[in-house]
Every structure is written in C-alpha cells, then in structure tokens.
Image (cartoon, rainbow, N blue to C red):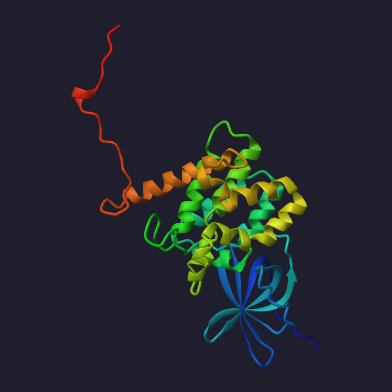
Amino acid sequence: MEIEIPYVRTILINAIVEQVHTYDSGASHLRILQETGQIDAWSWLPSTGQDTERVLKAEVCAMPLETSEGETHVVTRIQPRPELDVFSLIPDQFGKRDDIVFRCRDVVDACESEPLRRFLSNVFSMPAVYRNFWKCQASKAHHHAYAGGLAVHSIEMAENVRDTPRLTGMERDVGIAHALTHDVGKLWCYAEGGAHLYALGHELVGLAQLHGALERLGCDWPDGAVAMRSLLSGQWKRHGGKPLMAVGSLVRAYDQASAENDLRLHGRHPHRPWSPSKPSGDNVLTFRR
C-alpha cells in the first residue's frame, strides 16, 4: 500500500529571536525578526537561555502553519549565530520614518573598518539599543524632542560625516561610529526609572553601558577602543579642551548644526537658535575695478 506523504515547506532564515512567553506545557511563544518584518512562531525546543546583554541572533528553521487565528510558524531549529551583522536583522518598521532604518544601514555600510563595524553591530545588538534607539527622543524639551528623534538626529550626523570631503578613511569611520553612538546613553537616562542617571550625564552613562562592546573593540583594535572611549566620554569638551582626534570636533559641529536645523523648523520654539538677518541693499559693499 502506498501512502502519500504530504509536502512540508520549511524556511531557513537569519533572524533575531525574542521569547514572548513560555508556558508550563513547554511551549514557547516567539517573535522572529528580520529586515522585512517579524513573524509569529511557536517552539517546543529546549530554551536557549535569553542573554540580557545581547539579542539572540540565530539561524532559524521554521514551518509555516495555518490555524483558525491565521498563519503562524513552528520552529524546529534555532542555531545561535552571534557573529551575524545586526543591521540586516532590524525590521524597517522599527523606524518612526519609513526610510530611517534603511538610512542607518546605508551609513553603516560606508564604515570600512571591520573592527568598528563589529563594534556598531555589538552596540545595536544590545536589547535597549536594538528596540529603543528608533523610538527615543533626542532631548526632553529641546531639539528632536519627539519619538524617533534620537535616530533621526544621530543618523543625520553620521551621514554628514560620511559626506565630508578630505577625511581619511580612519577619520570617517571613527566619526560615523561616534555620531551614531554619541547620545546612546539617553536610552537609559530617558527610560522609566532612569531619572537618577541625569546626575552622571548621558555621555558617562553611555560610556558605562557600552563597556562590553568597547572591551570587544579593544581586543580587535586597541587604539580604536581608546579613541571611542575618549570621544564618547565627552570629557574633552570641558574647559575648552580638544578631542583626541580632530574628527570629534567635526562631529560636535554637526551635532550643533543638526539641533539648530530642527529647532528652526519650529518657529515659535523657545530655544529657536539665532540667525543673522539678510543684508539690506544699503549695507552691501560694492567694489570698483
């Protein structure tokens, strides 16, 4: 007797795996996230253990399953892949603006230093950064003070560094990394229960939170870790000091320019920056040959 075995379709993808809930029956409700979005899934596999310091990057094998409540997936294998670049695993829908996640990927792609690329991937693999960078404001009541403002501000600065002529490759790469991470400490300062961190300031909070990523950068490129620690600390800004690398001053200038441009968009904002008036005809100097 011949028995027809039904065809079972499976998918194999690189993704972020988030555990939503685990039931007493042993079933786990999962979210599988990648660039194109997220899918609902279930698993009866032994728990891989949720790392609180990094999202779970993995190769996932799953079977689509139709249910009365719609399509879901049954996960048959989760192979951790911590070396995966996280930027291809961030859903476009995370951005408050349609193009903001794409722009982030694009500017990170301009960074040619492999150690700094891995550093940025490690930073954005931190759960607080992976999830909240896209929806946090850049300030409470100043520039980019709206949901998603931090991502818009930081990515705009990084794009400006990328497009600056006459930088060396190393200066450009360090500048991009600095611009993307310069305000990351605000994710913790602005989080619920984070008000006590204001006393430290967001720069030192960010430096402390990125300690693990900076330690890994130090193993790859010791001088790169020194440069990033120095720039991110912000201590060089005190009393008119100079940054360890001149590109730090460039990033600081782009920081101010981005803030001022945003404030100009809000004409009645109390912190609207000063702008010179246009010269009148009477004040314009003319020269004769």
Q: Residue furthest left?
A: 282
Q: Residue at x 53, y 87 (%)?
A: 68
Q: Is residue 25 left or right of residue 206?
A: right
Asked whether 192 or 25 is in front, the reply is 192
Is any part of residue 136 visible from this angle?
A: yes
Q: State which quarter of the image contains the C terminus.
A: top left
In the displayed structure, would residue 217 be above or below residue 240?
A: below
Q: Please report the residue visible at 25 percent of the width from the left and 35 percent of the height from the top.
A: 277
In the rendered image, the residue lying farthest to the bottom is 24
Q: In this picture, is 62 found above or below 44?
A: above
Residue 133 rendering spot, x and y as whole percentages: 52, 62
Q: Nearer the viewer, residue 202 or 178?
A: 202
- Residue 260 is situated, as x and y percent measured from the top left of the image, at 38, 47
Left or right, 281 with respect to 11, comes to: left
Residue 87 placement: quadrant = bottom right
Q: Position of residue 71 (x, y in %)?
A: 56, 79
On screen, residue 278 above or below 11 = above
Residue, far right = 1
- Image quadrant holding the N terminus, namely bottom right
The image quarter in which residue 57 lies: bottom right
The answer to whether residue 86 of the structure is visible from this angle is no
